[in-house]
Amino acid sequence: MSSSEPLTNPYLWAAGSAAAKIEVGEAVADRYQVIAPHIWQDTLPELPREIPEELKDNIVPYLRLYPQRLHIPEVYGVCQLPESRPDSTVILLENVPIQTSGELYPTIESGWSKASAVRQVYWLWQLWELWKPLEELGVASSLLVPDNLRVEGWRIRLLQLYADNAQEEFTQLSTESTATSADSAVETVEEAGIALINPPVTASLQQLGEQWEIWCRKASGVVAEKLQEIVEQLQSEKPPLNAIASKLNQLLLEQAALQPLRLQVAGATDPGPNQNHNEDTCYPTAADLPTDSNQPSDPLIPHLSIVCDGIGGHEGGEVASKMVVESIKLQVRGLLAELAEDPEIMTPELVAQQLEAIIRVANNLLASSNDQQARESRRRMGTTITMALQLPQKVLTKKGMGNAHELYIASVGDSRAYWMTPRYCQQLTVDDDVVTREVKMARSLKTEALERSDAGALTQAVGPRDGEFLRPTVKRFILEEDGLLLLCSDGLSDNDWLEQLYRDYPRDVFSEKLSLEAAVESLIDLANQKNGHDNTSVVLTYCGVTPECPVVLNLGEIGKESDGYGINFTDSQTFAPTPLNQTAVNGDLQGLATDSSEEPVVGALVTTNRTSSELLTSRERWFKAMLGVVGILVVLLSSATALLTAQWLMDPEGFKQMRQRLLQPEQLKNPESESPQKPTSQE
């Protein structure tokens, strides 16, 4: 369900030309403090907000674009200025790219030259994806104002929306001295200056191409040429949309595939302190792991993770969630098998269609069971679902074949997905509840919808109705930074506790202070302590793309009591959490040790061999160290051979002289002789 907003004195963006004329430090309406031009702080967030009597055309696009809330701000309320001021109604926006310190996130221009090639292309891909929905609502001009485009790590965020065909002045943030520099630092609210400008009267792809061209001149050398080709197509009279999307997607996947990818997943579900049964089901858990190490590993692990929250009472909810999880697993196995046989890259649109179809098949299976049992109305079984699939498509790069780093998230209901790093916690999904329906239909602001008694009621779920009425949401992301992917039921996500307390988890997992399994258990404990009213399911996936640094081992500390070693060079390896005398880590994740006396939740820890994050014994570390030494010797020998070959090719006569000096028997018998020998003319 959609939870209420935390009362934390939020920073807001005041849109409109009237807001630009209010001086810094001024108090507005005895409530808002002007921190910087256009940046206001609500000093009384516990009070009701001012709501417009009529939702005008300058507010409706924000509401319609609510499903794009990862990128688009939301309407917080309005502030009515004295009638003596022109444009006396100021729209206040929340979910804006302003940090908790009151600083704006950097513009795309200021962050461009510092970004990696894959991130540069990823930013452009997001802008390309936003163009169509914004164009349909007449606000595509928002993507043509450089200072309106802010970046928070991987994602693009907009400060506000600009109307196309605008005849009035709009406001744009532009620093007086540094905004024109692509290398400028993040602007602070105290240093920012404001200039009034007219946005483009019309918005076209040609204009978008002109804007991209400025950035692409400074793009990373490995992508500059291909980006320039895309820009030229954008600026043509009739831009070939499908060709542009295909080229941009291919370039994005190629750059992502150059990075390593390490995945590790842990999952658990718990009934909660006040429930005697559990209607949640998640995947994977310890029950999904093979009991015999000789058994082949499940190809779904660690690529697939699922959380389902059952609906329909004790019996119905449990059956529904388990039935859907099993159906999804079976179908995704088939999808991965098909993918392995076909080298053709599946487009994002095709993958989204496949995942939608998979969820509809599971839906119809459950709906058929409801019909067979003559279940009616609220007795019909149903479930939410949030599933994440790291699609292991292979892309040819200059380094060979690599994983394309695609992450697809599909959802129905109010189970959620989050992306967490030490810097931010980003909600990747949007709930299918009454609040979302009312906002995106432009019937009310979010703050009004939250006051409804049925605010958290689901508007769709898997199972109650036929699949043709189901509208799963599928989004694609690219894994291009280290982070934690969290899937959870509303037992954890309710009341926004996660957003307030998330920071310790990625920080401690990355620093190896906390194992992934322990992080899952801690999140469940957090849910039970702060919420406690519902079942809780958590699946946490560590995604690492940073190249691992070599580790120096002290061979003298390797214990004699080690249990032995074994190395498996297969594509993937699965581990169950079993008690160990010694554990070690390699990479970003800490080894796990479980206490057999306590089993509060069902958990699983799974890694791939490609991740280099396996749980190693001491002898395994010794064996890997020896392999490392041998590898270094091989590299040195290969380098020497290459140098000698180059010498022979570039200077044959000199090479002969060197060979004679080193290999002539006379020199071996008389090592004290230092007189150089003349090369023989007979050779």
Image (cartoon, helix red, strand yellow):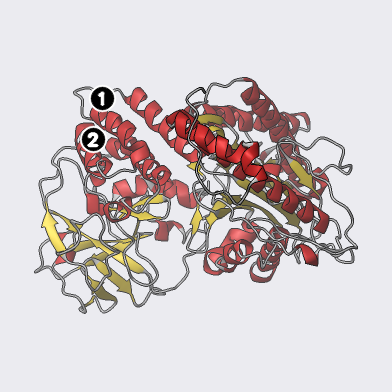
Secondary structure state at the residue bearing disc 2: helix
The residue closer to the viewer here, 413 or 194, is 194
- Give the spatial CA distance, label 1 vs label 2: 10 Å
Q: Quadrant of the N terminus?
A: bottom right
Tell me the amino acid under the disc marked 2: Gly
In the displayed structure image, the side of residue 503 where residue 280 appears, left or right: right
Nearer-N-terminus badge (1/2): 2
Tell me the amino acid under the disc marked 1: Pro
**How many circles with numbers are drawn on the protein?**
2
Residue 366: give its label.
none
The residue closer to the viewer here, 469 or 76, is 76
Q: Is residue 30 above or below residue 269?
A: below
Q: Are marks 1 and 2 in contact (CB under 8 Å)?
A: yes
Can the viewer see residue 475 in this picture? Answer: no
Residue under the image location 86 percent in, 63 percent down = 581
Residue 195 screen position, x and y as percent: 13, 60
Residue 474 screen position, x and y as percent: 52, 37
Residue under the image location 31 percent in, 43 percent down = 219
Residue 209: give its label.
2
Give the labeled residue for mark 1. Answer: 239
